[in-house]
Image (cartoon, helix red, strand yellow):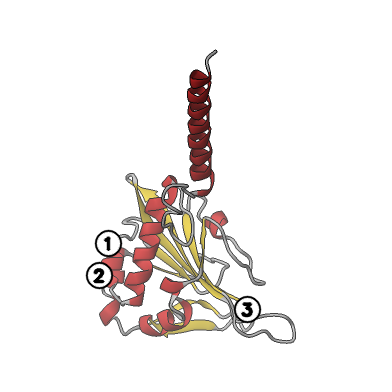
């Protein structure tokens, strides 16, 4: 075989190998030899979870902005939303509101019993505004640095039973790490967990859980 032909074959083989390596790098790590690493979100979301994450992040923004009209639009039309002040959901004591009731939260000044305080067992009797301030949006979860998708980032000493009470739930856990630690090793971490179930082919909000270390 003549040398010019060998040179062409070597060059062709090198180019093919280069493209194969570039393709493998891009598919496995997202890194491109030709344009650097593309922009990606701070957490990865597979195709099946895109609707879930979009809804959860939108709901968190609605809660932050006290836009209860917007929030009510994604509430499950039949089940409503259960509000649990702690990780352990107790349907017999936790408050449940339908979409039209949530839409009126902005002007609702009545006090409700939302559950019981862990430890003391005393009723949690608060207005909507006070409950949201203490047991829903006590921190800005729209900027939570860690987000769990159908996964609880951290548990305290309360029973985690969201998937037991809502077997078909899909949820997002907005987790904010603690800043202080006491002698027992407990710290002031907390999370907001938004759970959804499918209704007529679309995800609808069914449960809002607040999670933190509880005595």
- The residue that mark 3 highlights is 214
In the rendered image, residue 8, in percent from the top left (x then y), is placed at: 48, 24
Asked if one can make out residue 42 in the rendered structure from this viewpoint, the answer is: yes
Q: Earlier in the sequence, mark 1 or mark 3?
A: 1
Q: Secondary structure at mark 1?
A: loop
Q: CA distance from mark 1 to mark 3?
A: 32 Å
Q: Is residue 42 above or below residue 138?
A: above
Q: Residue at x 43, y 47 (%)?
A: 34
Q: Marks 1 and 2: CB-CB under 8 Å?
A: yes
In the rendered image, which residue does mark 1 sit on?
73
Q: Secondary structure at mark 3?
A: loop
Q: Earlier in the sequence, mark 3 or mark 2?
A: 2
Q: Residue 37, image x and y in percent?
A: 46, 54
Q: Residue furthest front?
A: 3
Q: Can you tell which quarter of the image residue 187 is in?
A: bottom right
Q: Quadrant of residue 107?
A: bottom left
Residue 101, image x, y percentages: 29, 70
Quadrant in the picture for the N terminus: top right
- State the separation of the CA atoms marked 1 and 2: 7 Å
Q: Which residue is mark 2?
A: 69
Quadrant location of the C terminus in the rendered image: bottom right
- The crowd level at tag 2 (other Cα within 10 Å; few <14, some 14-19, many 20+) is some
* Circle 1 residues within 10 Å: few <14, some 14–19, many ≥20: some
Residue found at x 35% / y 73% = 63
Look at the image and tell me whether residue 79 can be seen. Answer: no
Q: Secondary structure at mark 2?
A: helix
State yes or no: discs 3 and 2 in contact (Cβ < 8 Å). no
């Amino acid at each position: 075989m003549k040398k010019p032909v060998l040179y062409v074959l070597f060059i062709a083989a090198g180019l093919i190998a280069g493209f194969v390596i570039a393709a493998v790098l891009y598919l496995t790590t997202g890194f491109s030899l030709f344009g650097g690493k593309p922009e990606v979100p701070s957490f990865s979301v597979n195709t099946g979870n895109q609707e879930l994450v979009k809804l959860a992040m939108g709901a968190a923004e609605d809660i932050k902005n006290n836009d209860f009209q917007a929030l009510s639009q994604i509430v499950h039309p039949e089940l409503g939303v259960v509000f649990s002040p702690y990780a352990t959901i107790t349907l017999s004591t936790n408050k449940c509101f339908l979409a039209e009731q949530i839409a009126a939260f902005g002007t609702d000044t009545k006090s409700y019993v939302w559950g019981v305080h862990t430890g003391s067992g005393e009723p949690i009797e608060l207005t909507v505004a006070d409950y949201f301030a203490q047991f829903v949006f006590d921190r800005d979860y729209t900027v939570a640095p860690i987000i769990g998708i159908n996964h609880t980032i951290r548990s305290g000493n309360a029973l985690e039973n969201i998937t037991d009470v809502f077997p078909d739930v899909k949820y997002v856990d907005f987790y904010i790490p603690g800043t202080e630690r006491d002698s027992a090793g407990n710290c002031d971490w907390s999370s907001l967990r938004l759970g959804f179930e499918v209704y007529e082919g679309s995800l609808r909000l069914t449960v809002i859980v607040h999670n933190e270390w509880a005595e």
